[in-house]
Amino acid sequence: MRSKRLRRCWQRRLDALAAELAHGRAGGGDARPAAPPTPRRPGRGPAMIDIVNQLNAIRREAGGRPSEDGELAAVVLRREYGAPADDVWDAITDPDRVRRWFTKLGGELREGGNFQLEGNAGGDIVRCERPSLLRVTFGGPASIVELRLTALDGGRTELVLEHTVPLAAVGTRAGALYVGPGWDGAFMGLDLYLGGHVTEDFDPAAAAGSLEAQEFSQGSIQAWTALLRESGYASAEEIDAAYKVATGQYTPDLDGKD
């Protein structure tokens, strides 16, 4: 019964976010990716996630970027993966592979085309340079996500994600708390998939609202909050307000979220 309730709760949040995106809201057109998947073993319950190591594997940045039309609010995530760049590229662009760890991906998947993530955001494909660069609009024309892949020694790859939105559209310098935890979850989900921990019977949508996924998101929210406080980019009032929004979005079923 609890799993059905969590699924319904998560689907309502996704539906609400989709409606906000359709009307140009949700942080000025940005989208919050679905919560991270919990891998399953055949015939068994969810495998335990090493939450601390998964959180520590991501390097985070948040701040402003100048632009011709005014300041941009930006979040940047960096992480290394134990797979070659071509493999990582395919895992984030091939619809058959993306559906296994994130959600269904459709659209005209080429430079100049478009994409749609089921239950999440869509947009235009601005640049596509396999296997090193992908730039798309995400949920709105002013919300830009850029993925950069760099091949490292030992068959490893560094993945950098930068998400920028006009500060005037976000309305707060603490907007990293709106999108950062979702991107953290996506980075973790990709690692679990590339590491062989996601099986064919795994359902990302069903796992999105699990308590373990929410515990990961709780740690992510704390990490982004600490970053914002240390950077001085956002005021204490902005951070406190965004923290409440983030916990309501990503950890609705956890007690003692403070």
Image: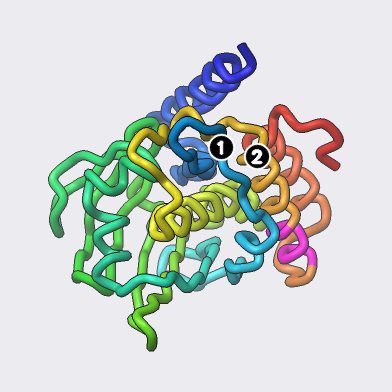
- Kindly report the distance in space between the C-alpha atoms of the residues bearing marks 2 and 1: 9 Å
252 w.r.t. 48: above or below: above
Which residue does the numbered mark 1 point to in the structure image? 46
Three-letter amino acid code of the residue under disc 1: Pro
- What's the residue at 52%, 33% (across, down)? 44
How far across and how far down the image is residue 216, in percent? 66, 47
Left or right, 9 with respect to 136, comes to right
Quadrant (top left/top right/bottom left/bottom right) for the C terminus: top right
Look at the image and give the residue range highlighted in magenta: 223-229
**Residue most toward the top?**
1
Label 2 sits on residue:
212
Q: Can residue 21 be seen in this snapshot?
A: no
Left or right, 121 with respect to 219, comes to left
Residue at figure coordinates x 61%, y 40% from the top left = 213
**Quarter occupied by residue 101:** top left
In the image shown, does 195 or 176 lie closer to the viewer?
Answer: 195
Count of numbered marks: 2
- Helix or strand or loop: what does disc 1 sit on? loop
Q: Quadrant of the N terminus?
A: top right
Residue positioned 71% across, 46% down in the render: 218
Is the Cβ of the residue at disc 2 closer than 8 Å to that at disc 1? yes
